[in-house]
Image (cartoon, rainbow, N blue to C red):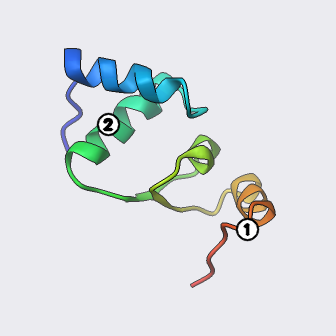
Amino acid sequence: MDVVVDEAGITSAMARLKTQRVDGYDLFLLEAMKANGLINLITDDGDFVTVPDITMFTANRNAITQATAQGKILVR
């Protein structure tokens, strides 16, 4: 998947920065996912716990604890 950093992507990423607690690299990854119609992400980066409209697959214990506390955990 290509991550395109252009004016439109930067504008969209900056808007997302106001509502989600993720760092700069994460912002551009999320924009690339959106552009490619992807909603599933395998990661150990706990920042993605705060992102709505994606499904995060992880073994990160802190992320799992947060998701459980929020009632967002799904065990398959």
The vertical placement of 65 against 51, above or below, is: below
Q: Quadrant of the C terminus?
A: bottom right
- Residue 25, how many percent across, how many down? 43, 28
Residue under label 1: 71
User: In the shown orientation, is residue 15 left or right of residue 4?
Assistant: right
- Residue 70, how many percent across, how many down? 75, 60
Rendered residue at 63%/63% (across/down): 59
The vertical placement of 33 against 7, above or below, is: below
Which one is earlier in the sequence, the residue at label 1 or at label 2? Answer: 2
What element does badge 2 sit on? helix
Rendered residue at 20%/28% (across/down): 4
Mark linked to residue 31: 2
What element does badge 1 sit on? loop
* Residue neighbourhood size for the residue with mark 1, other residues' Cα within 10 Å, grouped as few (<14), some (14–19), many (≥20): few
Outermost residue, top direction?
Answer: 7
Q: Considering depth in this image, is 48 or 11 the residue closer to the camera?
A: 11
Say which of marks 1 and 2 sits in front.
1
Rendered residue at 50%/25% (across/down): 17
Q: Considering depth in this image, is 22 or 19 the residue closer to the camera?
A: 19
- Residue 66, how many percent across, how many down? 76, 55
Mark linked to residue 21: none
Q: Amino acid at mark 1?
A: Gly
- Residue 35, how many percent across, how many down? 21, 43
Residue 14 visible here: yes
The vertical placement of 60 against 74, above or below, is: above
